[in-house]
Image: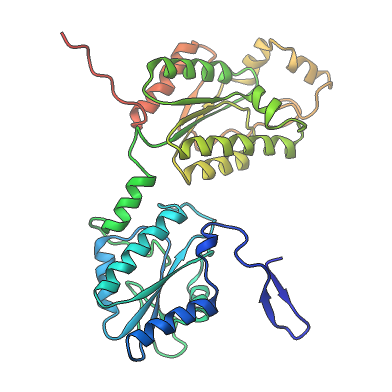
């Protein structure tokens, strides 16, 4: 349990900060208030406490806007929003480091502050106000907010990226963006092939892996479906729940490869749109995701049927078989569609390699010098 409600309707935390990022840097409201009180004492006078919620990278002009709007005796309470729930341009740790550096810069300019990570994924303005008040802030401070609001006036605030300005990134955030989101081809990527059994996706995936390994331009990992089933998903069946769990395990491993700048290739059937979307969101947090729909029609897949699986499914000997007794939901967001009915394996590989080149994930080859 994260909290306990006693018989007197008092809510108290139970073992706080046990999960989520930046656990060692979390602070309770009471601890934060003490830090702010110490800063106010050092400043030798009362000061407004202005909360600055940040969930994305700030540009140089954003920080200058904040400094200008916090004129007068003020303390800044930086709330680093690190909860899960939507894609961020920076991971929690990088965002925290950048805000710390920005806080130190403004402290040197006479605007001291405290940096606190807060596990809020995508809060509304009133939720932010309640959290900020609990930590001791008098008002929210943003590009469109009023640091001296009227009583009971929320004032506009658009949580992070609330900032819609242009211009160069603030240096502290630029460093972290370069560190976690390097440009291709150093940026990690997952190539996720989906299609019916017998569509040719596994053959293309193996061929693409071999070609890229021989090329030597990138580190490539093939997440073979049979090996995943044998090692990571041993004991799972083939009903919808277990199939979804198997795909999510593949997606998790692919996301970790992508996080570290590798190129992951996987080719499960992955018949359900919701699960594919979950994998895309998982990988998008740390790199790029390319979805390839191997759209070979069911009739052609049945004609090939080297393992006799379709025949057994037609006879009712195999339950939950995609295309026969279980649906295949075609992806509406495929980055590339390949039909291997009249396409050779090499041609299919060429198309995926062309996509990787077009997206900058493979270095362009120079013509041989004479």
Please say if 327 is above or below 162: above
Number of numbered callouts drawn? 0
Name the residue located 49 percent from the left edge and 77 percent from the top edge: 32
Q: Residue at x 74, y 12 (%)?
A: 308
Q: Is residue 332 visible?
A: no
Q: Position of residue 10 (x, y in %)?
A: 70, 83
Give percent across and percent down for residue 187.
38, 37
Colour scheme of the rendered structure: rainbow
Query: Does any portion of residue 178 appear in the rendered image?
Result: yes
Q: Is residue 184 left or right of residue 315?
A: left
Seen from the viewer's position, the closer of residues 345 and 4 is 4
- The answer to whether residue 350 is above or below residue 144 is above
Query: Is 343 placed left or right of 199 in the picture?
Result: left
Image-based side of 366 in relation to 88, left or right: left
- Image quarter of residue 226: top right
Note whether 291 is above or below 143 in the view shown.
above
Question: Is residue 133 shown left or right of residue 216?
Answer: right
Spot occupied by residue 85 in the image (x, y as percentages of width and height):
54, 56
Task: Name the quarter where the C terminus is drawn.
Answer: top left
The quadrant in which the N terminus is found is bottom right
Q: Give the residue displayed 54% in from the left and 44% down from the top.
A: 282
- Considering every residue shown, the one lying at the far top of the view is 370
Q: Quadrant of residue 363?
A: top left
- Near-viewer residue (60 or 1): 1
């Amino acid at each position: 349990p994260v909290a306990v409600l006693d018989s007197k309707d008092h809510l108290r935390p139970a073992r706080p900060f046990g999960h989520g990022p930046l656990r060692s840097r979390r602070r309770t409201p009471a601890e934060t208030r003490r830090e702010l009180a110490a800063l106010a004492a050092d400043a030798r006078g009362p000061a407004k406490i202005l909360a600055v919620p940040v969930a994305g990278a700030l540009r140089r002009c954003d920080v200058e806007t904040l400094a200008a709007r916090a004129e007068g005796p003020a303390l800044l309470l930086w709330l680093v929003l690190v909860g899960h729930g939507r894609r961020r341009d920076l991971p929690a740790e990088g965002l925290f480091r950048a805000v710390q550096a920005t806080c130190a810069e403004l402290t040197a300019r006479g605007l001291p502050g405290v940096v606190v990570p807060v596990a809020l994924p995508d809060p509304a303005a009133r939720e932010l106000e309640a959290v900020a008040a609990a930590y001791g802030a008098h008002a929210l401070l943003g590009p469109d907010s009023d640091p001296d609001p009227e009583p009971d006036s929320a004032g506009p605030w658009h949580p992070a990226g609330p900032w819609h300005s242009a211009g160069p990134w603030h240096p502290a955030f630029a460093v972290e963006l370069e560190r976690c989101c390097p440009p291709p081809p150093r940026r990690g990527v997952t190539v996720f092939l989906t299609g019916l059994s017998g569509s040719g996706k596994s053959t293309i995936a193996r061929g693409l892996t071999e070609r890229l390994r021989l090329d030597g331009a990138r580190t490539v990992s093939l997440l073979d479906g049979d090996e995943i089933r044998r090692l990571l998903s041993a004991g799972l069946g083939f009903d919808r729940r277990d199939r979804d769990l198997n795909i999510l395990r593949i997606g998790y491993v692919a996301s970790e490869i992508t996080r570290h700048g590798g190129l992951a290739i996987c080719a499960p059937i992955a018949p359900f749109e919701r699960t594919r979307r979950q994998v895309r969101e998982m990988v998008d947090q740390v790199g790029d995701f390319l979805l390839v729909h191997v759209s070979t029609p069911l009739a052609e897949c049945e004609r090939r049927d080297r393992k006799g699986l379709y025949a057994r499914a037609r006879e009712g000997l195999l339950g939950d078989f995609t295309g026969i007794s279980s649906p295949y939901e075609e992806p509406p967001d495929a980055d590339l569609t390949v039909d291997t009915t009249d396409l050779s394996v090499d041609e299919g590989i060429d198309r995926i390699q062309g996509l990787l080149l077009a997206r900058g994930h493979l270095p362009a080859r120079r013509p041989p010098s004479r």
